[in-house]
Image (tube, helix red, strand yellow):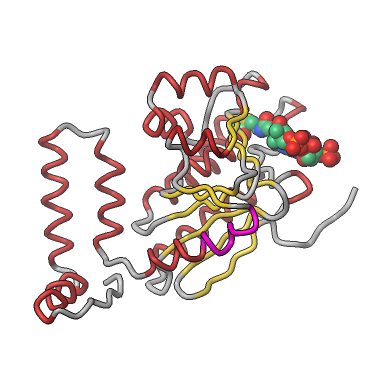
Amino acid sequence: MSISTAPVVLSSTDAGVLTLTLNRPEVLNGLTDDVLDAITDGCRQAASDDGIRVVVISGAGRGFCSGQDLRAGLESGDVDIRGHLRDHYVPMVRAMRDLEKPVIASVNGVAAGAGMSVALAADFRIAAESATFIQAFVRIGLVPDAGSSYFLPRLVGTAKALELAMLGETVDSAEALRLGLVHRVVPDADLGQATADFAARLTRAPRSAGLIKQLISHSLDSDLDEQLRREEEAQVLASESEDFAAGINGFITKRPPVFTGR
Ligand code: LHQ
């Protein structure tokens, strides 16, 4: 047994981008409570820090995330699954979704089980050509969790979601792009730069970008009247932002506005 003192999630901030790198490469970044809590903490930190505009989640080594670490005590049968989900998985998904800033999953390799859920809970997925996606839950007799059964049908439709979740087959990056599971596929060697370029664009987005995230997130769960009310609330907030003033000024003066996220 090797005892590692390396952090299970590496965290770094550069030019407004908080990058969280899952760091258990020997198990393709299998999820433990510590990993889940570190993602939650990172998203909460991003929420309270005006200097962070975008969060990127990626994986160290050849995997993105292999889902729940199946050797972290589960085989004994003594684990309180309900508590485990409620105390660690749910807060992570909520922290990613409640954050009024974009989250990018930079999928460098296999995303399996709850590892695929992490990717799906992000706002954007940029995949390396060698990345694969597996609804692995059914392979071990479980059901999708960590939001997969919510996000997957919304991304690919119920028929395809059912097929992916029930058969648990491996989806390669080309198929993931065709299905609308990912936004971009890039050569493996270009993933870091492509993610950095995409994130940099988002760091220049106005305050309204976070409000747009919330509007689109809620749209499929709302009827028209509710969504019209949500738009009204969000538009009032957006119109009170410094970025709206900068946007209007930019239009009038014919100079591109510089947005600050406020
Ligand atoms: C792993 C793992 C892993 C530990 C690779 N754990 N070691 C579940 C339960 C309870 C509550 C909450 O929610 C959940 C949700 C879930 O996420 S259930 C789904 C859990 N994930 C899986 O079932 C996927 C398991 N992994 C695999 O099927 C394969 O490893 C994949 C397809 C991901 C990758 O295959 P390969 O590229 O062939 O790599 P490998 O299998 O050789 O893995 C490399 C090493 O990583 C290997 O260790 P070893 O010591 O033999 O070199 C694996 O045992 C280890 N590893 N996933 N989840």
Residue 71 visible, this orientation: no
Task: Identify the image quadrant of residue 78.
Answer: top right
Q: Quadrant of the C terminus?
A: bottom left
| Left or right: residue 228 compared with residue 18 | left
Instruction: Determine whether 211 is above or below 32 in the image.
Output: below
| Image x and y of residue 130, in percent | 65, 44
| Quarter holding ligand 1 | top right
Q: How many marks?
A: 0
In front: 227, or 206?
Answer: 206
In front: 256, or 137?
Answer: 256
| Image x and y of residue 38, in percent | 58, 56
| Image x and y of residue 214, in percent | 28, 49
Instruction: Determine whether 254 is above or below 234 in the image.
Output: below
* Residue at the outermost right position: 1
What's the residue at 48%, 68% (across, down)?
17
Instruction: Determine whether 87 is above or below 77 in the image.
Output: below
| Image x and y of residue 186, in percent | 55, 51
What's the residue at 10%, 36% (across, down)?
225
| Left or right: residue 66 compared with residue 105 | right
What's the residue at 14%, 79% (across, down)?
254
* Stretch in magenta: 188-195
